[in-house]
Image: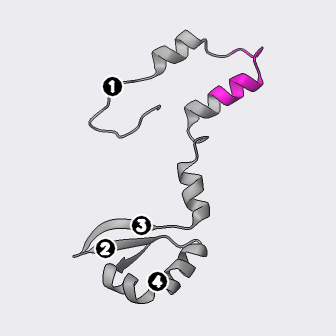
Amino acid sequence: MTDATISHLKNHLPEIVHDAEQGQDIQITRHGKPVAVIVSLERYNQAFSLDKGIFNAYLRWRNLHPNANGFTDKEIDNMRCREPHEESSFSWD
């Protein structure tokens, strides 16, 4: 990932957008601290697709293979942790 200051971004936006289109992530900094990231639309869609995550992948697999041995709805519900954990930002939702 490449760093760029806001002032650099302001003066070189076309080049930075081109770099992002080519697959390079650009971290934007303000006063030396990261504040944002520029990524290509393709990478953005990959990262924020609603079809991501092992839980959703398992549910899709289960829907495609209803007769396969798998977890019951109750077992899946019991596995889901609804309490936020301080040490992790992971969530099934």
Element under label 2? Answer: strand
Identify the residue at image location x=61%, y=11%: 72
| Magenta stretch, residue numbers | 59-69
Is 68 magenta? The answer is yes
- Residue 88 coordinates in the image, percent (x, y): 34, 39
**In the rendered view, how is the structure colored?**
one colour
Please name which of the two marks, 4 or 2, marks the residue nearer to the observer. Answer: 4
- Which residue was labeled with disc 4? 13
Q: Earlier in the sequence, mark 3 or mark 4?
A: 4
**How far separated are the C-alphas under marks 1 and 4?**
42 Å
Q: Are marks 4 and 2 in contact (CB under 8 Å)?
A: no
Q: Earlier in the sequence, mark 1 or mark 3?
A: 3
Q: Earlier in the sequence, mark 4 or mark 2?
A: 4
- Which residue was labeled with disc 1? 83
Three-letter code, disc 1:
Glu
**How far separated are the C-alphas under marks 3 and 2?**
9 Å
**How far separated are the C-alphas under marks 2 and 1?**
33 Å
- Which residue was labeled with disc 3? 37
Three-letter code, disc 4:
Leu
- Residue 76 coordinates in the image, percent (x, y): 54, 17
- Which residue was labeled with disc 2? 29
Q: Are marks 1 and 4 in contact (CB under 8 Å)?
A: no
Identify the residue at image location x=59%, y=55%: 45
